[in-house]
Amino acid sequence: MPLHPVHRAVGYSFLLHRKHGDTPLTGRTRSGSSGVLIMTEHTGTHIDALCHQAYNHRLYGSVEVTPEIETPYGFKRHGIETVEPIVGRGVLLDVAARKGVEYLPKHYRVSALELQKCADVEGVEVRKADVVLVRTGYGRFWKEAAKYEEAAGVSPDGARWLASVGARSVGADNMAWEVDDGTVDPELGVTLPCHALMLVDHGIHIIENMNLEQLGAEKVYESFFVCTPLKFVGATGSPVRPIAIAGI
């Protein structure tokens, strides 16, 4: 599954430590099996906690990152356990389809105007508290790391527009929701400016590495969306299995 380069040192491992074969058979013998997961919180499809990013060493709400806040055992503020289940209206903005391509060009930045036009063509309105999902088409490269990491993403002005309309959460079928090519944003002076804008400035959670192919193929532009992060106390994110239900 997709892993950002900074998380590959840990990766994902499943170790079986108790096996059915450890229990000798004596007629109708009940046995059990269990294992251990070793992974980063940002493995595969996952959601970012607000403590995941800071700007000038300050988290969302101007919380200063100090040793009392960022401890060896996790964050004391804005950990993933503070995120309520995300349940509500989901909106798919299928930018790739609107442009008539299978996937957008390498490192293409989707502007606010393009997001707005996409919504107009689809006949949907982005409203306050919506979960807005942006399809770039790069979900097809889930198992091709080099191609997947070249994905298009949302531009800073696109992020600002979604924040201005009050999106509750955002997601995309790429590694970072925005373009992750090391470019320093000229206005904010940082790489991954959308992370600073959404997580730090506006408290909007980002869901990454989503599978939006079926929603796009079936033109499901509005859905009942559910995403429930795991309650890892003090963690900077959580793997999730988001669900979009059509026709409700």
Image (cartoon, rainbow, N blue to C red):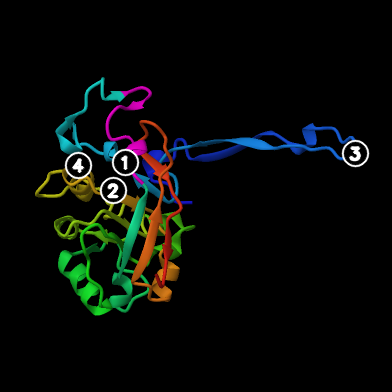
Please name the amino acid that badge 4 sits on: Val
The secondary element bearing badge 1 is classed as loop
Q: Nearer the N terminus, badge 2 or badge 3?
A: 3
Upstream in the sequence, badge 2 or badge 1? 1
> Is there a contact, CB below 8 Å, between mark 2 and mark 1?
yes
Residue ID at (37%, 40%): 237
Circles 1 and 3 in contact, beta carbons < 8 Å: no
Amino acid found under the numbered disc labelled 1: Ala
Side of 169 relative to 166 (left or right): right
The residue to which callout 2 is attached is: 205
Q: In which quarter of the image is the C terminus?
A: bottom left
* Residue 147 picture location, percent across and down: 40, 59
- Mark positioned earlier in the residue sequence (4 or 2): 4
105 to 210, vertically: above or below: below
Report crowding for label 2: few under 14, some 14 to 19, many 20 or more residues within 10 A (C-alpha): many
**Secondary structure type for disc 2:** strand
The residue positioned 43% from the left and 66% from the top of the image is 245
Is label 4 or label 3 in front? 3
Q: What range is drawn magenta here?
A: 71-84
User: Can the viewer see residue 150?
Assistant: no
